[in-house]
Amino acid sequence: MSTAPRQRRKEARPQELLAAALTLFVEKGFAATRTEEVAALAGVSKGTLYLYYPSKEELFKAVIRENLSARIAEAVDLAAQHQGSVTDLLCHVMQAWWQQVGMGPAGGISKIMMAEARNFPDLARFYVDEVVQPIHRLLGGLIERGIASGEFRPVPPTETVQVLIGPMLHMILYQHSLGACRLHGPTIDAPAVLAVQVDLILRGLLAKPLGH
Amino acid sequence: MSTAPRQRRKEARPQELLAAALTLFVEKGFAATRTEEVAALAGVSKGTLYLYYPSKEELFKAVIRENLSARIAEAVDLAAQHQGSVTDLLCHVMQAWWQQVGMGPAGGISKIMMAEARNFPDLARFYVDEVVQPIHRLLGGLIERGIASGEFRPVPPTETVQVLIGPMLHMILYQHSLGACRLHGPTIDAPAVLAVQVDLILRGLLAKPLGH
Amino acid sequence: MSTAPRQRRKEARPQELLAAALTLFVEKGFAATRTEEVAALAGVSKGTLYLYYPSKEELFKAVIRENLSARIAEAVDLAAQHQGSVTDLLCHVMQAWWQQVGMGPAGGISKIMMAEARNFPDLARFYVDEVVQPIHRLLGGLIERGIASGEFRPVPPTETVQVLIGPMLHMILYQHSLGACRLHGPTIDAPAVLAVQVDLILRGLLAKPLGH
Amino acid sequence: MSTAPRQRRKEARPQELLAAALTLFVEKGFAATRTEEVAALAGVSKGTLYLYYPSKEELFKAVIRENLSARIAEAVDLAAQHQGSVTDLLCHVMQAWWQQVGMGPAGGISKIMMAEARNFPDLARFYVDEVVQPIHRLLGGLIERGIASGEFRPVPPTETVQVLIGPMLHMILYQHSLGACRLHGPTIDAPAVLAVQVDLILRGLLAKPLGH
DNA sequence: AATGAATGAGTATTCATTCAT
DNA sequence: GATGAATGAATACTCATTCAT
């Protein structure tokens, strides 16, 4: 209880390092981020970083676990317990993901993986196992539940998941790459796009048409 | 008539270099591709590459011009001359882009830009001006034409363009990144996804509902 | 007190690197000296050099500050405090410069600047501000003092400074260039030349002729 | 007599190449001058240069022969034939050298040699044999003639040659190096310096003092 | 004779990782 | 535990020279 500040500091170190790493990896990419910068942003020296994480790759894996694995587990739990309309659940899950992950810096992790998967096969494997597969299982399952319950038309689940995920991921990627440069490209109003997507796709998905 | 082999080579070199550069840039990214590798893949020495392109960045710009700018111009022409249903035109443009660009290696260029825009601001600017803006102008214009002609519901054009582009771009990115690693992630059946997308989104877009 | 060897090295490194740099820059010139050679001569690796100096140019500037700026400041102080004959002071300043700078490796810096000024404008600017101007101000001031005190004839100060500096600088350059090659060119006996110069020029400078 | 322009061109080539080489070598130094630039300035292609001179070093030797050896031979002849006062002859030779060589681009050759002798020992040897030695023999001989004739005091000839040459050479070097950068260093008024030098040194050299 | 396409050795600088203190 | 000095592998770009045309 009366842990000295030094003690608190020592316990907080991993979190501080992960936060610094997330920020810089998203900003510059994995390969282009220097470990020394991560350490500096976390307020420690280069050597200290290696005390907590044995390499840059392991540091990145820890960032993924910290920021994505946990969120996914929550969503899976939520879906398992939900009782009512699958439509509502699907909307909720997607909105929540956007709020908690997509909008924030953690969204940038997907950019990094897209960018550097082929140069770092170990990271790619880890990310697919830890993130991509679970999300596909979750959303695919929801589509199947909706079809089974008669809410949705009998669409192919796997492909529909792609169509659901696509625009959201694309916006995330854009905002963390070209959108982050101060250029005169198209400005993306993410909530508006999500609204349009929900409108368009639900109309297409639902067994019973909505009105205008 | 009496073009010596040396002469023929000189004229073919730029194409050979651009093809090699496209392959490697897409595979490894811009920063991680070594110029010497590009030269080797094109069957020439390091120095020769610099005879044709003054720097790695200029080489990359040339790759973009060669592979994307030309295709975009074709699509713009096609759209300007098309007379019939906007729905057909939109489907055609998107299918053609997928066939000619998305599916092939040129699709990987968008991955590179997502990945490295923030580290190479000059390239980002070039890509936005040369590729992103023209595509948005083209598709946005089609949506507006469809609304004006009464084919489409009065959706917001800019955001709808995002929803149209999103899944396609996401698939492209996926196939050039995680999909290219031999992992057990979800296998994407791109034509099937496109079919689902067209089905879902057109249902949402059209003023008059389709049947099942 | 308990300075570990590592610590002692850290403090000594800049000096060791500057000494190695001076030696090699004088021997081969600025452009032709490889940073790795400098590091090797100082007994460290390539990377260590860059821990202390951010670039080859900054290393060179540090060599100038270390070897010339300090000497010039000393001479300026001496001149400011000197009370007696300007003739004596002038002789002393020139002899001292020859002993402390001209004769030693630091003399070679002027060779480098002559050689590479036009290819490295930043270095040229630095050298003019830091070395050439101060020396001219010092010697020009001495000539003026001598004229004002009636010791010297009313010669034009600026041009006289050139005549004073010329032979010394020429000898320095010669010894660090052609003289350093084992050739059968004229061997320069620097002290003898200086003696002749002092004899000839003082005779020309003094208001009252000397005897034979 | 009716040589076609093409013929005239072919015969003029070596001269044009030497002129171009002199200009660029003086401006940038030997190592830093690219052979392609020399060829371009002479209006021919890279390959053509090698048709006339087998290497960059041989090109440089030819520049020396063309611009210095010839002038020296003229001065030697003049000195051999001169009958009157050695003082006049010495003044004349030095002024003529300044006018014909020092002031013009050929003066820059000495800068190059100072700069790069140690990196190109072959060139150094050639320059000493072809230029330095002859000039020293010429001027040393004049001093001895002046002493023998009673015009000059019995000064040591070799060292006196250094004092004579020094300021002139220094000015040449300065004007081709730091002086050629647009900096705020001291501006050298070469004729004024020469006048001062002649005044000072002759006063010191002559057996019978001049008046004020 | 003239060209210019091709070559490949050579070099400043960066950065993940180690380890003595 | 914490530091930061030291390392050395890795890479874009240049330029003298050659030689097929």
Image (cartoon, coloured by chain):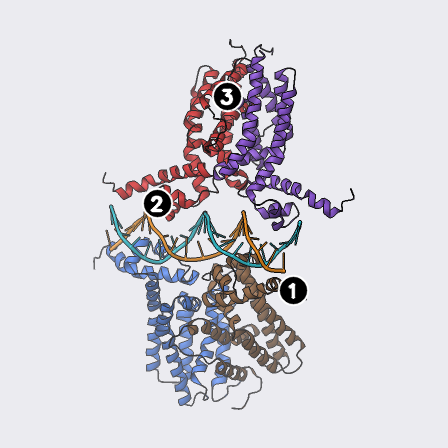
Chain colours: A blue, B brown, C red, D purple, E cyan, F orange
Q: Chain of mark 3?
A: D
Residue A12 visible: no
Residue under label 1: B3
Amino acid on which the number 2 mark rests in the picture: Val
Given contact means CB atoms under 8 Å apart, are the residues at marks 2 and 3 in contact?
Answer: no
Report helix, strand or loop for mark 1: loop
How many numbered dots are placed on residues in this image?
3
Identified by mark 1, the residue type is Thr
Where does the image place residue B184, in percent across and percent down from the top left? 37, 77
For the point 64% across and 45% down, which residue is it? D41
Label 2: how many residues lie within 10 Å, few (<14), some (14-19) or many (20+)? some
Q: For mark 3, does the 10 Å Cα neighbourhood hold few (<14), some (14 to 19), or many (20 or more) residues? A: many
Mark 2 element type: loop
A81 or D206, which lies in front?
D206
What residue is pinned by disc 3? D159
Residue A117: name its quadrant: bottom left
Q: CA distance from mark 2 to mark 3?
A: 43 Å
- Front in this rendered view, residue D135 or D201: D135
Could you tell me how far apart the alpha carbons at marks 3 and 1 are, in whole angstroms?
67 Å
* Disc 1 crowd, CA 10 A, few/some/many (<14, 14-19, 20+): few
List the single residue furthest toward the top: C211
| Residue annotated with mark 2 | C44
Where is residue C62? Give x, y as percent.
Answer: 42, 38
Q: From what the image shows, is residue C63 above or below residue B140?
A: above
